[in-house]
């Protein structure tokens, strides 16, 4: 079955710097890759997603890149702000399947 | 309208007791997912409903876990004879389209279950 690995587990950056979180997946049939942000004690919220027919997607300060050949995808946050501090999860799923497989999460700290 | 609602928010039970966790999805959402999230980990898939049909229950960890969605809206996750390893946050998510179309999922706040 699908396996998603996420790195780093913890990331600390200075306000205004960029943050990059990387994920790899094992099943080449995976074709949908959402990213979720989860603040302490709150629900995961979708922040951006990408499908396998595109290589990059951007939404303001957030971008995601996908390398299908290498089976990895990354989240890029530019101009980080303290309110970006949270746990970020990558995930992968396969069209025609019902499971979404999540990574273990990255705890991002943005220091003011 | 309102987002996904889960109740109770917190549940404490003694080992061996049965518990029932409720999920109210967004109105009109076809798909409903249950996940188990252990401390410091990502959500792990438990089961999936398309309307009232349970199409995938491969993630349920044992036959003590049972889920239903009899009328295609509200869902209940039941855990019988609870064990300490069942302690986790149980998340429910819904999406508008069938689950195999890979649409974004909307999560509830979860139920934090603690087994003593």
Image (cartoon, coloured by chain):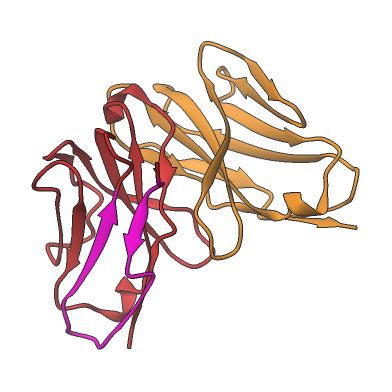
Is B55 located above or below residue B60 in the figure? Answer: above
User: Which residue is at 43% across, 53% downward?
Assistant: B43
Residue furthest to the front = B1
* Chain B visual colour: red
Q: How many marks?
A: 0
- Decide whether residue B4 is among the magenta residues: yes
Residue furthest to the top = A53
Q: Say which of B105 and A98 sits in front.
A: B105
Is B83 located above or below residue A19 in the figure? Answer: below
Q: Position of residue B48 (x, y in %)?
A: 23, 42
Is A18 located above or below residue A53 in the figure? Answer: below
Q: Quadrant of the N terminus of chain A?
A: top left
Q: Position of residue B60 (x, y in %)?
A: 22, 55
Judge from the rendering whether residue B17 lies leftward or rightward of residue A64; answer left or right: left
Q: Quadrant of residue A87?
A: bottom right
Judge from the rendering whether residue A76 lies leftward or rightward of residue B18; answer left or right: right
Q: Position of residue B46 (x, y in %)?
A: 28, 51
Judge from the rendering whether residue A98 lies leftward or rightward of residue A47; answer left or right: left
Chain appearing in orange on the rendered image: A
User: Which residue is at 17% across, 84% downward?
Assistant: B16
User: Which residue is at 50% across, 17% downward?
Assistant: A52
Q: Position of residue B115 (x, y in %)?
A: 32, 82
Q: Quadrant of the C terminus of chain A?
A: bottom right
Q: Say which of B4 and B104 sits in front.
A: B4
User: Which residue is at 49% across, 68% downward?
Assistant: B39
- Decide whether residue B108 is among the magenta residues: no
The stretch in magenta equals B2-24
């Amino acid at each position: 079955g699908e396996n998603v690995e996420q790195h780093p587990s913890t990331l600390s950056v200075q306000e205004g710097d960029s943050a990059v979180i990387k994920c790899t997946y094992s099943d080449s049939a995976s074709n949908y890759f959402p990213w979720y942000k989860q603040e302490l004690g709150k629900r995961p919220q979708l922040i951006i997603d990408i499908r396998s027919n595109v290589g990059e997607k951007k939404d303001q300060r957030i971008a995601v890149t996908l390398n299908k050949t290498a089976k990895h995808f990354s989240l890029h946050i530019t101009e980080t702000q303290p309110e970006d501090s949270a746990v970020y999860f990558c995930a992968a799923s396969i069209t025609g399947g019902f499971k979404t497989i999540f990574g273990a999460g990255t705890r991002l700290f943005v220091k003011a | 309208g309102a987002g996904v609602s889960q109740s109770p928010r917190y549940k404490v039970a003694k080992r061996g007791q049965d518990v029932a966790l409720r999920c109210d999805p967004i109105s009109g959402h076809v798909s409903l997912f249950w996940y188990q999230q252990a401390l410091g980990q990502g959500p792990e898939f438990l089961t999936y409903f398309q309307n009232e049909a349970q199409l995938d229950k491969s993630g349920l960890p044992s036959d003590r876990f049972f889920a239903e969605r009899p009328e295609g809206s509200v869902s209940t996750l039941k855990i019988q004879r609870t064990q300490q390893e069942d302690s986790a946050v149980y998340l429910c998510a819904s999406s508008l389209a069938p689950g195999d179309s890979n649409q974004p999922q909307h999560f509830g706040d979860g139920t934090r279950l603690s087994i003593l």
